[in-house]
Image (cartoon, grey):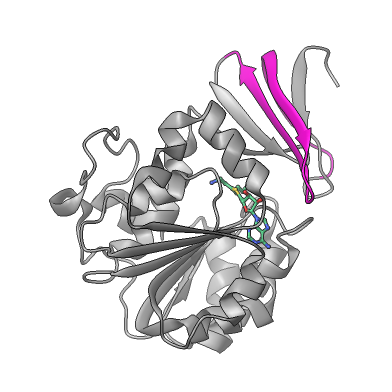
Amino acid sequence: VIPGWFSEISPMWPGEAHSLKVERILFQGRSDYQDVMVFQSSTYGKVLVLDGVIQLTERDECAYQEMITHLPLCSIPNPKKVLVIGGGDGGVLREVSRHSSVVQIDICEIDKMVIDVSKQFFPDIAIGYEDPRVNLHIGDGVAFLKAVPEGTYDAIIVDSSDPIGPAEELFKKPFFESVAKALRPGGVVSTQAESIWLHMHIIQDIVANCRQIFKGSVNYAWTTGPAVDFKHPVNPIDANQDTCKSKAPLRFYNPEIHTAAFCLPSFAKKVIDSI
Ligand code: AAT
């Protein structure tokens, strides 16, 4: 550990640790579920850390929040009811709210401290909560989904932390079975499925489970209900984005990157194609 630097050390990535220089620590707390920390970094803006693992930085959050949201929402025409599991910072809500066809945005985040901290330190991300279509539920995403009536949602976005800690069950087959039930036919799901460099085995398990459950088009790093060509946008974002004027425009997502995001390096393609 280098003094004055934050190092991301986890059994999820043995033998390596991404480090950022710390200007100052802005918040440190312990919730019922995890350690919560916010620090000001030298070059990545403010950083949100849960149990020692970086969840977002102000500099690059667009790449994650925009892609995990617009890949599914631009893949089906007129999404109306959307569920977010996790995502307590509000970034995915901000992105969902760019879609004018959406009438209802439910979110189920387990940890209220993440929400409070985001509202305090990340106003440009927590702005997602200001949309009147948002209904916040604080609780475990697994339990929430079990209670959802069959065929409720057009899209479900699983913005979850890593499978060590409170998100463990969100990577297992029974969870994806409840996701499938909660989706209407032709609905779509995207999920945080980890990195091809570090976690090919996790990705393999998720894709294998989802190919059994969803039967239709299932691809890294996202899964979908049947009869959807997920690889090419059918519902372009440009036409309907920016329903909320105070939000900054998209920084990362566009229709070209949507299609390109499904092109994988050979080693990963080989694994996914063989499942
Ligand atoms: N958009 C920021 C990125 C995240 S946040 C993941 C969120 O999932 C956290 O707020 C966490 O509290 C919440 N969460 C974890 N488990 C559950 C659960 N069982 N039910 C509901 N919410 C949950 C993810 C970044 C991933 C980084 C990968 N290295």
Residue positioned 48% across, 33% down in the render:
60
**Rendered view: 68 above or below 273:** above
Quick one: quadrant of the N terminus? Answer: top right
Q: Is residue 105 left or right of residue 111?
A: left
Q: Nearer the viewer, residue 231 or 86?
A: 86
- Find out whether residue 29 is within the magenta segment: yes
Q: Nearer the viewer, residue 122 or 196?
A: 122
Quick one: quadrant of the C terminus? Answer: bottom right
- How many marks the image carries: the answer is 0
- Find out whether residue 266 is within the magenta segment: no
Residue positioned 42% across, 79% down in the render:
217
Q: Nearer the viewer, residue 130 or 190?
A: 130
Residue positioned 44% across, 41% down in the render:
63
Q: Is residue 59 left or right of residue 193?
A: left
Q: Nearer the viewer, residue 215 or 37?
A: 37
Q: Where does the image place residue 101, in percent across and percent down from the top left?
A: 21, 63
Q: Where does the image place residue 117, in percent across and percent down from the top left?
A: 61, 34
Q: Is residue 116 left or right of residue 58?
A: right
**Rendered view: 194 above or below 83:** above
State the image quarter where residue 194 is shown. Answer: bottom right
Q: Residue furthest left?
A: 239
State the image quarter where residue 77 is shown. Answer: bottom left
Q: Where does the image place residue 145, in percent across and percent down from the top left?
A: 57, 76
Q: Where does the image place residue 248, in percent across and percent down from the top left?
A: 29, 32
Residue positioned 53% across, 21% down in the render:
45
Residues in magenta, as a range: 14-42
Would residue 261 be visible to someone looking at this image? Answer: no
